[in-house]
């Protein structure tokens, strides 16, 4: 997978993202707080995978609770019931190379999404939070991996039930998403802190 340095928020933030992802703002309206990149070509990543960077007002919770707070809100917006979300993996208090004064956590969550008028869309969300302490902002990096193919959905169901086998197409796709999020975190850089002034 090839990555390229990409200007986000008009160049105020930069990060390495997969080459040839499509900026979704070119074909649909995206909130000013978000940068959304989608894949429409399965030779790059998996078709319909999406990378979203979102600047959120800092949640009024402890650092260790912030990721779960935002995950719960994303699940609510996706129409995911509490019992339809399973935490597959978590990592806490990670270091972000270019933002040493930040706090970072990552979670991988499997969800049965009731969005788009369908009940059979399974989604894995790889979500990272970078708490930018000096500007009271929670920067969220999410990578959405939707599953539609029967063999992948079967693999995913096994993972969600606790059978974390090392084989399977679902795990391979999730691992790709985790690599993308890790690369974004490793390369994330604030070029212009004025972005965060009201």
Image: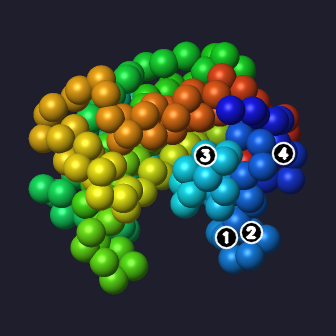
Q: CA distance from mark 3 to mark 4?
A: 20 Å
Given residues 135 and 177, the one toward you in this image is: 177
Please give the name of the residue rendered at 35% of the width and 74% of the height, measured from the top-left corner.
Answer: 115
Tag 2 or tag 3, which sits nearer the N-term? 2
Please give the name of the residue rendered at 22% of the width and 28% of the height, measured from the top-left corner.
Answer: 164
Proximity of marks 3 and 4: CB atoms separated by less than 8 Å: no
Q: Quadrant of residue 130?
A: top right
Q: Secondary structure at mark 1?
A: loop
Q: Quadrant of residue 23?
A: bottom right
In the image, 62: left or right of 182? Answer: left
Q: Which mark is residue 7?
A: 4
Q: CA distance from mark 4 to mark 1?
A: 16 Å
Given residues 7 and 178, the one toward you in this image is: 178
Proximity of marks 2 and 1: CB atoms separated by less than 8 Å: yes
Vertical order, 13 against 39 (above or below): above
In the rendered image, residue 3, in percent from the top left (x then y), is placed at: 75, 34
In the image, 102: left or right of 104? Answer: right
In the rendered image, residue 38, in percent from the top left (x then y), is placed at: 64, 58
Vertical order, 191 against 43 (above or below): above
Given residues 97 and 154, the one toward you in this image is: 154
Tag 1 or tag 2, which sits nearer the N-term? 2
Tag 1 or tag 4, which sits nearer the N-term? 4
Mark 3 = which residue?
A: 45
For disc 1, the neighbor class at 10 Å (few under 14, some 14 to 19, many from 20) is few
Q: Does the image show residue 115?
A: yes
Mark 1 = which residue?
A: 30
Which-is-in-front pick, marks 3 and 1? Answer: 3
Tag 4 or tag 2, which sits nearer the N-term? 4
Tag 4 or tag 3, which sits nearer the N-term? 4
Which-is-in-front pick, marks 3 and 4? Answer: 3
């Amino acid at each position: 997978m090839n990555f390229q340095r990409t200007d986000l928020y008009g160049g105020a933030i930069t990060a390495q993202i997969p080459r040839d992802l499509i900026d979704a703002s070119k074909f649909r309206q995206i909130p000013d707080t978000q940068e959304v990149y989608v894949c429409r070509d399965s030779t790059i990543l998996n078709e319909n995978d999406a990378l979203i960077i979102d600047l959120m007002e800092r949640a009024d919770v402890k650092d260790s609770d912030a990721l779960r707070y935002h995950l719960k809100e994303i699940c609510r917006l996706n129409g995911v019931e509490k019992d339809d979300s399973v935490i597959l993996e978590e990592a806490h208090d990670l270091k972000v190379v270019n933002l040493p004064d930040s706090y970072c956590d990552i979670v991988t969550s499997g969800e049965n999404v009731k969005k788009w008028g369908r009940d059979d869309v399974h989604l894995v969300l790889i979500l990272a939070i970078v708490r930018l302490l000096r500007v009271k902002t929670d920067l969220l990096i999410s990578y959405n991996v939707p599953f539609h193919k029967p063999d992948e959905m079967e693999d995913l169901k096994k993972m969600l039930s606790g059978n974390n086998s090392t084989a399977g197409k679902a795990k391979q796709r999730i691992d790709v998403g985790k690599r993308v999020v890790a690369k974004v975190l490793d390369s994330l850089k604030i070029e212009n802190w004025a972005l965060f002034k009201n």
